[in-house]
């Protein structure tokens, strides 16, 4: 029985050390940042998680675990400021709300409202849309729906300046953002490109039995510009 007591004591010490380390290294920002995790609706009706960061008059504390990152934020704290610019973030394939948490925290600390959707069917927990011909047009519609939610339904929407909307995307998120600001993808060239240049992304599409490699290609959906986005990275 003594070894059980000793083992239990060691486990308590280890857990306490992990907790203390997490609290001590919690991701904070220069100025107070508020955070909310909400459920919006994707255009097809599926639930779509949104992480929202914003300047706040609340008191940040290490309370919010986002993925493997502990955030020092004010959960659901009051929004500070008016006519705040909005930035929406589109993660890459298999990413999530926390993919660009450093950027989101920095922008919110600098006075921006930031919204990062977890693209349904294309995130770390759900890859059901991987390889779908409509994957990229669906992602664009989801990012557009995120802007709709932030401007019309978020509890702090009256603090946002709807004429100052920006977008950031990386990898597939970069593709998503480009289509929303006027980029015209030549989806029909994917199959011939992959046949001539079998690079990593082509192997991934082949593994997913993607319709994007079929000839003729299936319906890839429509890509439309969102004129509300005034700046993009």
Image (cartoon, rainbow, N blue to C red):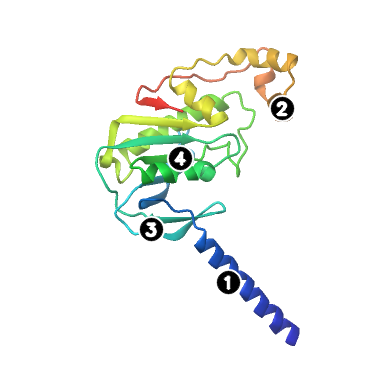
Name the foreground residue: 27 vs 47: 27
Residue 6: x, y in percent?
70, 82
Q: Is residue 50 left or right of residue 216?
A: left
For the image, the number of numbered tags is: 4
**Tag 2 near tag 4, CB within 8 Å:** no
Residue 123: x, y in percent?
58, 40
As helix, strand or loop, the secondary structure at mark 3 comes to loop
Residue that mark 4 sits on: 116
Tell me the mark number nearer the camera, choosing from 1 and 2.
1
Q: Is residue 3 left or right of residue 84?
A: right
How far apart, in angstroms, are the residues tagged by discs 3 and 2? 42 Å
**Which disc is residue 60 wearing?**
3
Which of disc 3 and disc 4 is earlier in sequence? Answer: 3
Residue at left 74%, top 20%? 198
Which of disc 4 and disc 2 is earlier in sequence? Answer: 4
Which of disc 1 and disc 3 is earlier in sequence? Answer: 1
How many residues crowd mark 3 within 10 Å: few (<14), some (14–19), many (20+)? Answer: many
**Which disc is residue 200 wearing?**
2
Tell me the mark number nearer the camera, choosing from 4 and 3.
3
Residue 40 figure quarter: top left
**Vertical comparison of 6 with 205: above or below:** below
Residue at left 52%, top 20%? 221
**Which disc is residue 16 wearing?**
1
């Amino acid at each position: 029985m003594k070894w059980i007591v000793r083992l239990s004591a060691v486990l308590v010490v280890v857990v306490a050390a992990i907790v203390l380390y997490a609290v001590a290294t919690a991701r904070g920002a220069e100025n107070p940042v508020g955070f909310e995790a909400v459920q919006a609706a994707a255009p097809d009706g599926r639930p779509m998680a949104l992480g929202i960061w914003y300047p706040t008059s609340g008191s940040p504390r290490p309370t919010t675990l986002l993925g493997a990152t502990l955030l020092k934020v004010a959960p659901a704290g009051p929004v500070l400021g008016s006519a705040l610019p909005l930035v929406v973030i589109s993660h890459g394939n298999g990413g999530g709300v926390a993919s660009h948490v450093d950027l989101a925290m920095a922008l919110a600390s600098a006075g921006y409202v930031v919204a990062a959707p977890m693209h349904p069917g294309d995130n770390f927990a759900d890859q059901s849309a991987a390889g779908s011909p409509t994957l990229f047009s669906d992602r664009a519609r989801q990012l557009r729906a995120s802007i709709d939610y932030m401007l019309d339904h978020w509890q702090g929407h009256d603090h946002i300046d709807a004429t100052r909307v920006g977008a950031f995307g990386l990898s597939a998120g970069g593709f998503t953002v480009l289509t929303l600001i006027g980029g015209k993808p030549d989806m029909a060239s994917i199959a011939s490109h992959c046949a001539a240049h079998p690079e990593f992304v082509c192997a991934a599409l082949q593994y997913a039995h993607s319709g994007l490699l079929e000839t003729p290609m299936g319906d890839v959906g429509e890509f439309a510009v969102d004129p509300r986005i005034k700046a993009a990275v």
